[in-house]
Image: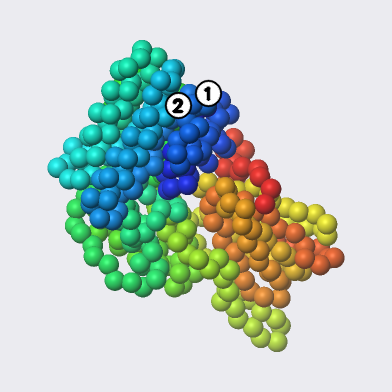
């Protein structure tokens, strides 16, 4: 089954593309062109492309025009299914509720034009996760960005339904596989949290992780997901560790954690490469103890390669970002020794390791 995604370069669209490409062997994923000209090759289309910030008139017109273009590309096709990403607030008396109601009516009329067509609306709660644009449509993204950059922000005192973006993708894939015809699906949230509590948790992450190099306690899946979201907004991935030296040599604090997990080390001979994979949930740290190494990273879906040089003579480490495939290789013609840490024990049934060359 071919699944097309509009807005595949956006926040949710990117994550859904990665999720289907690497986790769903029974599905083929297609990035829908901006003019929607390739929707005909897809069995299911997930419409995620949306503009929701800016002048209200512009937001309304942009989203209505986008829906009309998609409607015209779909019109006349058979055996197609359309999933439209809406919101829990789609019935609000706002410009956002207005264009969503009108778009739903348009797509519903399309589906009723032929018995082989199907349309469903997805009512989605507040979504958070890595790579969401700050100051746009996620208060968590805005909080992370502003806290890391020591900017002022306004914090409300209300409860919010939240879902981590990869958990949202899992539910969307379940709906695709179900192949049902429900006119509307309510996406289940992961948790209900108070905005002030989220803010205080993120402040704690900054105090522990950025200011004191301590990986905080992460007792719940929500905490792990929130922490991974927080650290995705940190731009400088190369960190110099605290060290203490005397006549004997030096001592460096490689890992300080309240999160558990496991440490291990490896040697790598010249001419060999370790890695060539990425993770979707694991925290991972690389620290070169002996020799000199080159570590390369590339965000999945991008061609840009980021490279770092680490040496056993320097007290530095790199915390690997999620969704970046990475490798490590000796820089010179000598063996290297590398210390690794991950926040969870190895589970051979669920390794969270996806192979792709940098």
| Residue annotated with mark 1 | 1
Apparent side of residue 276 relative to residue 29 in the rendered image (left or right): right
Q: Is residue 299 above or below residue 93?
A: below
Kindly indicate the quadrant of the structure image that contains residue 336.
Answer: bottom right
| Residue 138 coordinates in the image, percent (x, y) | 32, 53
Q: Residues within 10 Å of mark 2 (few under 14, many from 20)?
A: many
Helix, strand or loop at label 2? It is strand
**In screen coordinates, is 287 left or right of 65?**
right
Q: In x, y percent, where is residue 55?
A: 25, 55
Of residue 192 and residue 88, the one placed in the foreground of this image is: 88
338 and 303: which is toward the camera: 303
Residue 89 visible in the current orientation: no
Residue 233 visible in this rendered orientation of the protein: yes
In this rendering, position of residue 305 left or right of residue 76: right
Quick check: marks 1 and 2 in contact, CB under 8 Å?
A: yes
Residue for point 33% across, 34% down: 68
Residue underneath mark 2: 44
Q: Is residue 349 above or below residue 76?
A: below
At 35% from the left and 40% from the top, the residue drawn is: 66
Instruction: Give me the residue at 56% from left, 61% from top.
Output: 319
Residue at x 24% of width, y 59% of height? 196
């Amino acid at each position: 089954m071919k699944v097309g995604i509009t807005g595949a370069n956006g926040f949710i669209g990117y994550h859904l593309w990665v999720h289907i490409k690497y986790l769903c062997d029974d599905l083929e994923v297609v990035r829908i062109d901006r003019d929607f000209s390739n929707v005909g090759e897809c069995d299911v289309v997930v419409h995620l492309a949306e503009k929701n910030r800016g002048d209200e008139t512009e937001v309304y017109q942009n989203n209505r025009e986008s829906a009309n273009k998609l409607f015209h590309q779909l019109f006349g096709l058979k055996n197609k299914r359309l999933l439209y990403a809406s919101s829990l607030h789609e019935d609000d008396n706002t410009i956002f509720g207005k264009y969503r109601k009108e778009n739903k009516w348009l797509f519903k009329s399309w589906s009723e034009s032929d018995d082989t067509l199907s349309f469903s609306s997805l009512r989605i709660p507040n979504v958070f996760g890595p790579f969401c644009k700050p100051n746009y449509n996620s208060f968590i993204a805005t909080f992370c960005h502003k806290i890391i950059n020591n900017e002022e922000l306004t914090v409300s005192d209300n409860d919010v339904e939240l879902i981590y973006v990869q958990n949202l993708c899992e539910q969307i894939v379940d709906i695709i596989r179900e192949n049902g015809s429900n006119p509307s699906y309510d996406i289940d949230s992961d948790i209900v949290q108070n905005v002030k509590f989220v803010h205080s948790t993120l402040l704690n992450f900054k105090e522990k992780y950025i200011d004191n190099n301590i990986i905080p306690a992460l007792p719940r899946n929500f905490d792990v997901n929130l922490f991974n979201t927080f650290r995705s907004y940190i731009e400088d991935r190369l960190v110099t560790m605290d060290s203490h030296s005397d006549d004997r040599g030096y001592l460096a604090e490689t890992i300080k954690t309240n999160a558990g997990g496991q440490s291990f080390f490896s040697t790598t001979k010249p001419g060999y490469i370790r890695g060539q994979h990425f993770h979707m949930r694991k925290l991972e740290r690389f620290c070169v103890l002996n020799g000199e190494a080159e570590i390369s990273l590339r965000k999945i879906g991008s061609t840009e390669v980021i490279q770092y040089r680490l040496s056993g003579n320097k007290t530095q480490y790199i915390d690997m970002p999620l969704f970046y495939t990475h490798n490590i290789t000796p820089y010179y013609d000598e063996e290297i020794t590398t210390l690794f840490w991950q926040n969870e024990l190895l589970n051979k049934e669920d390794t969270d390791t996806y192979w792709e060359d940098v």
